[in-house]
Image (spheres, grey):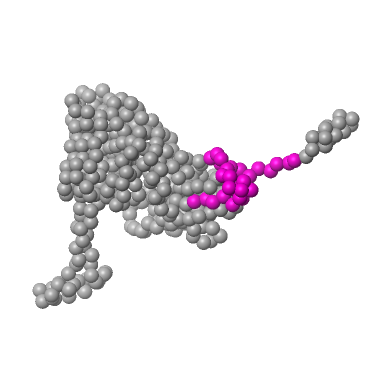
Amino acid sequence: MSEIAIRVEGLGKSYQITHATSGYRTLQEDLRALIKRPFSRGSDAPRQETFWALKDISFDVKQGEVLGIIGRNGAGKSTLLKILSRITKPTIGHADIYGRVGSLLEVGTGFHPELTGRENIFLNGAVLGMSRRDIQARFDEIVAFAEVEQFLDTPVKRYSSGMYMRLAFAVAAHMEPEVLVVDEVLAVGDAAFQKKCLGKMSEVAKGGRTVLFVSHNMSAILTLCKRGILLEKGGIVLDSDSNQAVAQYLNTEELSSVVERPIYDSTKKLHIYHATLLNHGKVTNSFATSETLTLQIKCRVSQRIREAQIAFDFATGSGEYLFSSTHQDFTGEKGELTPGDHVFECEIPLQMFRQGQYRIGIASSVPNVEMLDFIEQPLVFEIVDDSSPMFKLGQERKGIIVPMLQWQISKASEVSQKETVGLST
């Protein structure tokens, strides 16, 4: 048997993008343009552009290797995984995969919404080429991992995103495909679920199976992967060990102090449409340790939600979580959110942090019930140390946190005199 699990040669994927020349028009204007089109000279014709999401991608992955694929949003990571999972066809080149592929690219990829959780387990197993006997042998383990026993015979269209995610990952990981492909969808789960999934992926890798892992959590990449590929604008800029790939990615990652998402009419109970970092009311991506960062989050609620919470994770530039917080931490009450727009603000004093790059991820959920919404793109900012005398002398403070603590200095003779007076009384 070949030692190569995946071979990619000259892979490329292009899309045709249409640019309208006259912008948005009314229905009446469209009808007029349609009537005039046979007599026009093509000046109003939409302009076509070829966009290459991937171009000239080549690499090999050995059996049992865990490969991390990193890059900014739009670099081509998800497109590459969709091609490898046979969801999308390449425009040029080819990708050969030796063995069954288990894919987890989006929440519930491959699930039929009208079927129950039980039926989808057997359906996915059959797609992977498993016999009914093999699926039954792993069935209890899958259900236990997903923690959906109570809703096993409920159509998955009624599942919350968290339940959907747990079951989808459990099926993909426990069906023992030779190649496991996992996208950033793990961001949907809470911290405990992410830890559980990463542990399972580590177990899969140690079992000799091949894993392709896409994530913005650089700490997870460094933990699971010995090798990393950095994508940029659809091409490979570095194929090296994970430490070098992560270091170069962090050096090129752009600071982002604002995330805007369009407000749209959907079935979401809560939609986060704006998040920004403020310093005295001004948007910025650079803060001093003597300053206070204000995190502002705006969301739209379509129906009353009991016990909903807005939460954020505060992490280093490499994705190592430092702490998390929810708006309920301050009040200690499990309130409710009513329909309408809501603005949440949290002040974070920065004197505890050393200089460097940091990330804030934002999500909303009803704890232990469902994930309401999350922002895939983190807020990325830098902290500059301006408070330590050591920094002014050119010495960087060490450690994950660097609190400015108060010290009291006195002569030893004065301390002894105080102790003596205390004993005499």
Out of 324 and 246, give the one closest to the viewer. 246
Q: Is residue 255 visible?
A: yes
- In screen coordinates, is 138 left or right of 189? left
Rendered view: 64 above or below 236: above
Tell me where residue 405 sits by quadrant: top right
- The vertical placement of 19 against 273, above or below, is below
Which residue is found at the position 39% from the left and 50% from the top? 252
Residue sitting at x 23%, y 65%: 19
Image coordinates for residue 376, horizontal then vertical, percent:
37, 48
Instruction: Please name the residue shown 50% across and 41% down the image.
Output: 322
Q: Position of residue 392 (x, y in %)?
A: 61, 50
Which range of residues does the magenta coloring cover? 382-409
Q: How many marks?
A: 0
Asked if residue 154 can be seen in this view, the reply is no
Q: Position of residue 127 (x, y in %)?
A: 19, 34
Q: Is residue 59 left or right of residue 145?
A: left
Quadrant in which residue 171 is drawn: top left
Residue at image position (22%, 49%) is 55
